[in-house]
Amino acid sequence: MTTAALKAKPAATLIIEDVAAQAKDHFEGIVKAGQEQATKHFEQTVAATKEQVEKASAQLLKSYEEYTAFSKANVDALLKSGTIAAKGAEDINKELVAFAQASFDKSVAAGRALLSAKSINEVVELQNSYAKQSFDSLVAEATKLQELSVKVANEAFAPLNARVNAAVEKFAKPLAA
């Protein structure tokens, strides 16, 4: 449009066009400001979400590493306990074999003594003596085996007991907090 054509338009039309142009500019400004605000909030939300995901991932990784270390310590305790129990069973078996050998030797010696006895009274006396010694030996050996078994059991359960205590301490902390 030329300047002459603009002059030819009525003043009301010019005012309406001017108001429409101002309204359009104002509306575009509002839309642009809204878009900028939305973009800003979106970027902030993405940044906050990224930060939270990174924190959660780090915490998850840390928890996994702690769980792995805790599980490894449990397996180590179980292996240690098994080793102690196996060694204890070996010691108990050695003790039993030694007792059986000693009992057999005493039985052979008692049998020889009975065969060389000169009278029935001597046989009865030797038999009574052998029975008393055998019973006393059996009671002493049973006591020794019981003490050894208790010692082995306590030693074998010590690593497992330590892990149970560690588990109670570890899992009780979050509950207490």
Image (cartoon, rainbow, N blue to C red):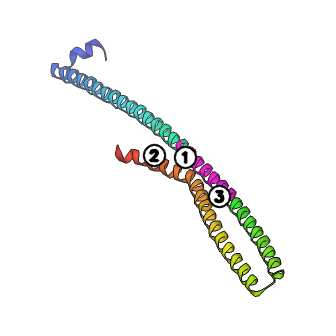
Q: Which residue is mark 2?
A: 170
- Kindly identify the amino acid type of the residue bearing the numbered disc 3: Ala
Compared with residue 51, is residue 77 higher up or lower down, i.e. above or below? below
Residue 166 highlighted magenta (yes or no): no
Q: Position of residue 53 (x, y in %)?
A: 46, 38
In the rendered image, the quadrant that contains the N terminus is: top left
In the rendered view, tell whether residue 146 sits above or below residue 113. above
Residue at far top of view: 3
Mark number for residue 52? none
* Disc 2 and disc 1 in contact, CB within 8 angstroms: yes
Decide which of 96, 7 is in the foreground and name it. 96
Please report whichever mark, 3 or 1, sits nearer to the chain's N-terminal start.
1
Identify the residue at image location x=63%, y=62%.
144
Q: Residue at x 68, y 72 (%)?
A: 133
Q: Quadrant of the C terminus?
A: top left
Q: Quadrant of residue 69?
A: top right
The residue that label 1 is drawn on is: 70
Residue at 60% x, 50% y: name it: 77
Residue beneath disc 3: 85
Residue range in magenta is 66-88
